[in-house]
Amino acid sequence: MDPRVNRREFLIGGVTAAAGLVASRLPATAAVATSPFTISLAQWSLHRALQAREIDNLDFARVAREEFRIEAIEYVNAFFKDKARDAAYLAEMNRRARDHGVYQHLIMCDGEGNLGDPDPAKRTQAVENHYRWVEAAKTLGCAHIRVNAASSGSFEEQQRLAADGLRRLCEFADPHGINVIVENHGNLSSNGQWLAGVMKMVAHPRVGTLPDFGNFYDYDRYQGVTDLMPFAKAVSAKSHDFDAAGNETRTDYARMMRIVLDAGYHSWVGIEYEGDRLSEREGIAATHRLLERLRTAPPAAKE
């Protein structure tokens, strides 16, 4: 997700939408074993339709499967912000995912405070605010929650503070079997060297990264993904627009997916369309076609 778009205002305003009990993981294990990588759908790709209430969070599993033939989904907590501990709602999410044969892969968590806040009390509160999403992720059969590593101060101080908050959250998530993964999502987290350093400082088996192809800004995106892939537990294939040949115009997907595969990663790659020229559904379909092409004929390994 692009942290510069009007998403922050949206998160502040809040919306409602999603939850359920353990969904089947069958699509996860079967597909990963037979493909160079597998394809999931990030809910943010449909944020305009969700904000306009054209679809509801509970519709997401059906839309992913019926409209795009995608079998794994990545939620955004903003679309069911007040439902994290609503057992009936989470059970309904699980029922719908199960009915459509969709694996609920992760929850992207925003608006819960800064895990690297310099104020110890605020940092502790941010850590504890994420507990409900760890618990919701477990209920939904997810593997991960995606968090942010926001902080302030010097380069090194922000690393130390973010590592402290992340480590404490990982210690809570560990007995639940949930990973805590960090996206390059603005400020120093969009510096691959900085975030890789944070991962090394946390040094917990539950921590990891979610490299996003597009959220590097002043940092080379290919170098950034290279920096983060050793720690990657999920990948976000950001897209904005496509040329006549079906190639993404901002990111060389063949080059990027070679970086991903060369790192030994063969799991879920999430479609996250954020463009304006194509509609959300057209953009998702175009990204899906491009990833399918690269999955069928993976880019040659770097010599």
Image: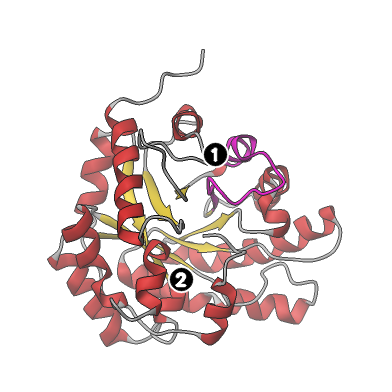
Q: Is residue 17 left or right of residue 131?
A: left
Can residue 20 be seen from the camera position used here? no
Kindly identify which residue carries mark 2.
134
Kindly identify which residue carries mark 1.
229
Q: Position of residue 161 (x, y in %)?
A: 76, 63
Instruction: Please say which color scheme the image uses.
Output: secondary structure
Q: Nearer the viewer, residue 251 or 222?
A: 251
Q: Dot 1: within a 10 Å radius of its alpha carbon, few (fewer than 14), some, or many (20 or more) residues?
A: many
Can residue 125 be seen from the camera position used here? yes
Of all residues, the one furthest to the right in this rendering is 154
Q: Which residues are magenta?
A: 208-230
Q: Could you say whether the residue bearing mark 1 is in a helix, strand or loop? A: helix
Tell me if residue 125 comes above or below residue 143 in the rendering: below
Give the mark nearest the N terminus, 2 or 1: 2
Q: Is residue 259 left or right of residue 153?
A: left
Please give the name of the residue rendered at 67% of the width and 51% of the height, measured from the top-left corner: 190
Three-letter code for the amino acid on which mark 2 is drawn:
Val
Tell me if residue 92 comes above or below residue 199 in the rendering: below
Q: Position of residue 302 (x, y in %)?
A: 50, 18
Q: Could you say whether the residue bearing mark 2 is in a helix, strand or loop? A: helix
Q: Dot 2: within a 10 Å radius of its alpha carbon, few (fewer than 14), some, or many (20 or more) residues?
A: many
Q: Nearer the viewer, mark 2 or mark 1?
A: 1
Q: Is residue 263 left or right of residue 141?
A: right
